[in-house]
């Protein structure tokens, strides 16, 4: 950090700007994770940290080390690439587990396994079976 | 391509990654090249389905669009969270029938949708090709449908299919 005082003013401002953007977005994302009510809403908040939260801090680091070492230092950008490419794995795993549990509990708020509105045959079939149920009920009476 | 270099593009990407991490020098270049070639032999032994890129020229456009959308949705989602008193019931699920079937294209679509704050990939039914999304700010459902179908899926179909 002894180089920090020697940095030109434009570099200091740029680094501070990107650091604040990155750290600020990560903070907002963490606050959202705590504050939001349903699981599916909470899933969105940390993506602030994995997208521009990571990118902002990585870009600030690239600028700082490139100026201090007087050559282009880019390996921090790889962090962003790896985070972007691996986040979907855990996120889809979590959301599918939550969806499976909600479907098992017959939660009405989640979409059913077979969305009926895309499948006209399926809805007709269900109406048919409901009609036969109705008939059966009337016969019993 | 051939037995010695089964994935030439992957070898190049691995060498670039190696040089970014270890520093640019002739020694590191040779070491990185050797590692990359041996690593691609390992991948070839698994016999993965070979992805085919049909339209290289559209990739920069896709990256630019995604970059712009990620910046925009970061601001939007941060705004909603900071605003605090958002009304209940504004977020919700969306069911989208997809036309894209290429596994590579679907993987990229998953990364785009997950990486963009405000949309989350929840479930994908490969038999029916139906995608379930959760959208944080579901005010205009047709706008989101339009975004996924015409902005991302169309480009991915052009690139991979």
Image (cartoon, coloured by chain):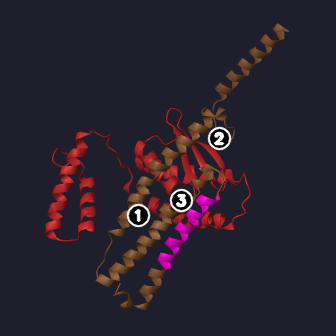
Chain colours: A brown, B red
In the image, residue A112 above or below residue A10: above
How much space separates mark 2 and mark 1, taking CA atoms?
32 Å
Q: Main secondary structure of the magenta part?
A: helix
**Label 2: chain letter:** A
Which residue position is annotated with label 3? A46
User: Visible in this render: residue B133?
Assistant: yes
Magenta segment: does it hold B108?
A: no
Give the numbered dot on residue A80.
Answer: 1
On the same chain, marks 3 and 2? The answer is yes
Q: Say yes or no: labels 2 and 1 on the same chain.
A: yes
Residue furthest to the front in view is A34
Residue B116 at x, y percent in the picture:
53, 58
Quadrant in which the N terminus of chain A appears: bottom left
Q: Residue at x 49, y 71 (%)?
A: A22
| Local crowd size for mark 1, using a 10 Å CA cut-off: few (<14), some (14–19), many (≥20) | many
Residue beneath label 2, please? A110
Residue A95 image position (x, y, % from top left): 54, 45
- Segment colored magenta: A17-35
């Amino acid at each position: 950090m002894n180089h920090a005082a020697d940095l030109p003013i434009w570099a200091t401002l740029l680094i501070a700007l990107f650091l604040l953007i990155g750290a600020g977005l990560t903070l907002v994302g963490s606050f959202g994770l705590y504050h939001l009510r349903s699981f599916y809403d909470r899933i969105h908040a940390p993506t602030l940290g994995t997208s521009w939260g990571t990118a902002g801090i990585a870009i600030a680091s690239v600028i700082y080390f490139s100026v201090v070492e007087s050559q282009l230092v880019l390996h921090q950008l790889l962090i962003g690439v790896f985070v972007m490419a691996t986040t979907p794995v855990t996120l889809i795993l979590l959301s599918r587990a939550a969806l499976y549990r909600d479907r098992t509990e017959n939660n009405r708020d989640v979409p059913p396994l077979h969305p009926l509105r895309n499948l006209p045959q399926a809805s007709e079939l269900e109406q048919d079976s409901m009609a036969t149920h109705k008939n059966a009920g009337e016969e019993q009476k | 391509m051939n037995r010695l270099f089964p994935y030439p593009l992957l070898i190049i990407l691995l060498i670039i990654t190696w040089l970014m991490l270890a520093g640019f020098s002739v020694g590191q270049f040779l070491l990185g090249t050797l590692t990359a070639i041996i690593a691609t032999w390992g991948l070839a032994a698994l016999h993965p389905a070979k992805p085919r890129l049909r339209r290289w020229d559209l990739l920069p456009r896709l990256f630019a669009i995604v970059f712009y959308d990620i910046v925009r949705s970061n601001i939007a989602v941060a705004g909603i969270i900071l605003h605090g008193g958002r009304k209940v019931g504004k977020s919700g699920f969306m069911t989208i029938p997809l036309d894209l079937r290429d596994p590579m294209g679907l993987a990229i679509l998953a990364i785009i949708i997950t990486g963009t704050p405000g949309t989350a990939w929840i479930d994908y039914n490969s038999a029916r090709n139906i995608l379930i999304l959760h959208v944080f700010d579901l005010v205009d459902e047709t706008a989101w449908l339009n975004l996924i179908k015409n902005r991302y899926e169309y480009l991915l179909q052009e690139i991979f299919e």
